[in-house]
Each structure stands twice: as C-alpha cells, then as structure tokens.
Amino acid sequence: MLVENLGDYATSESFGNRLEELEADADDLRGFLADDTLVRAEVVND
C-alpha cells in the first residue's frame, strides 16, 4: 500500500513542482560554489 501511495505521489503535479524547485536550488548552489572557488583561487594567486 505504501508503494502504491508513493507511486501516486511521484506522478503528482506537486512532486514535479518540488523537483523543479530542488533542481533550481541545486543550480544556485553550484553557481555559488563556482563563484566561491574563483574568489579563493584569486586570493591564493595574489
């Protein structure tokens, strides 16, 4: 029964919307980490 409920949830619109939000958050975090890495590299190289 739990698996059936999860299956229904996985196909629901709210799950898709949440997945898009998580992907956007991950993209933001990747950008932040890339910026932070560049700043650290500049400090080390100066």
Image (cartoon, helix red, strand yellow):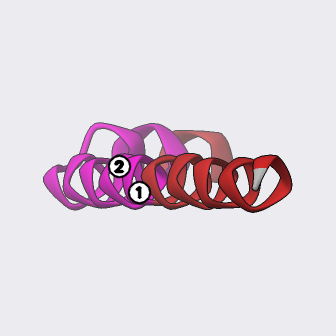
Q: Look at the numbered disc 2 and give the secondary structure of its residue.
A: helix
Q: Is residue 43 magenta?
A: no
Residue positioned most to the front: 46
Label 2 environment density (alpha carbons within 10 Å; few <14, some 14–19, many ≥20): few
- Of the residues shown, which amino acid type is indicated by label 1? Leu
From the viewer's side, name the closer residue of 36 and 31.
36
Residue drawn at x 74%, y 59% as measured from the top left? 40
From the viewer's side, name the closer residue of 25 and 44.
44
Q: Look at the numbered disc 1 and give the secondary structure of its residue.
A: helix
From the viewer's side, name the closer residue of 11 and 46.
46
Instruction: Read off the magenta span.
Output: 6-28
The mark lying in front, picked from 2 and 1, is 1
Spot occupied by residue 13 in the image (x, y as percentages of width and height): 14, 51
- Of the residues shown, which amino acid type is indicated by label 2? Leu
From the viewer's side, name the closer residue of 15 and 41.
41
Quadrant location of the C terminus?
Answer: bottom right
What residue is shown with label 1?
Answer: 22
Kindly indicate the quadrant of the structure image that contains residue 3. top right
Label 1 environment density (alpha carbons within 10 Å; few <14, some 14–19, many ≥20): few
Spot occupied by residue 17 in the image (x, y as percentages of width and height): 19, 56
Q: In this rendering, is residue 24 above or below 4? A: below
Main secondary structure found in the magenta portion = helix
Q: CA separation, marks 2 and 1?
A: 5 Å
Residue drawn at x 39%, y 47% as measured from the top left? 27
Q: Is residue 23 visible?
A: yes
The reply to whether callout 2 and callout 1 are in contact (CB within 8 Å) is yes
What residue is shown with label 2?
Answer: 19
